[in-house]
Amino acid sequence: MVLFVVGFINAQHRSKNDVELTPLIGFATSNYYGEERLNNSSLSSVNFGADFDFFFNDRWSLRSGLLFQTMGSEVTPYYTEKLNYVTIPVNANWHFGSTRKWNLNFGPNFGFLNSAKGNGSDIKNRANSTQLGLAYGIGCKIEVNEKISVLIDYQGMTGLSEVPKKSYYTIKNMYGAFNVGGVFKL
């Protein structure tokens, strides 16, 4: 128990050119938002993927990766839209606290539509094939040893581009996920 507490307090310090790889999985919710009041509710899903951090110094890194995310909404009680994206975040990641175990990240998120279903029917031809969003998050690493940590974080994304190709009003994605991952110093 004492070793766990000491490891938690003395989190890993990173320096220039260090790289971390973080496979992760999480519970996500998404919904649409727009200029009109939509009669919809959030959609729950599982997301997974891998992030990497390239460190510029002990406080700043570039966070990117490849994530598989389901977005969409329960548009009415009888109709659900699920849009599956492969997303690539390109975020500045600020590591803070005396041991740098906490981080805040923010930046653009680029999404590429894999599939789109409305109540199980293919609606991909009606949805934009790409998505631009503003990603943001906060997380904490718990050190296991010098090379391995556990990451617990929240990541959000506010869509800046339209979901449908054509619409009479604005429809964009909102997304949030609580994740857990293994951090490996390469």
Image: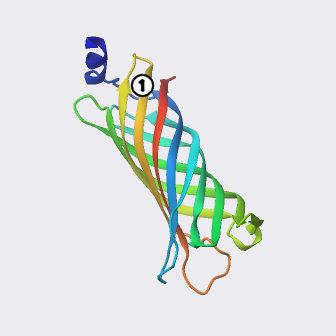
- In the rendered image, the residue lying farthest to the bottom is 168
Amino acid identity at mark 1: Ser
Query: x, y (%) of residue 51?
Result: 53, 38
Left or right, residue 144 beside residue 34: left
Q: In percent of the image, x 31 and y 24: which residue is there?
A: 11
Q: Position of residue 30 (x, y in %)?
A: 51, 60
> What's the residue at 47%, 28% (across, down)?
183
Residue 164 location (% of width, % of height): 65, 74
As drawn, 12 above or below 37:
above
**Residue 2, relative to residue 158: is it above or below?**
above
In the image, farthest residue toward the front: 77
Instruction: Please tell me how crowded label 1 is: few (under 14), some (14-19), or many (20+) other residues with Cα within 10 Å.
Output: many
Applied colour scheme: rainbow
Relative to the observer, which residue lies in front, 168 or 64? 168
Q: Is 93 positioned to the left or the right of 9 in the image? A: right
Which of 174/130 is in front? 174
Viewer-nearest residue: 112 or 180: 180
Residue 61 placement: quadrant: top left
Residue 14 visible to an observer of this rendering: no
Mark 1 highlights which residue? 149
The structure residue drawn at horizontal position 57% and vertical position 46%, both measured from the top left corner, is: 47
Disc tally is 1
* Above or below: residue 32 compared with residue 65: below
Work out whether residue 92 or residue 102 is closer to the camera in this orientation and state it: 102
Q: Quadrant of the N terminus?
A: top left
Label 1 residue SS: strand
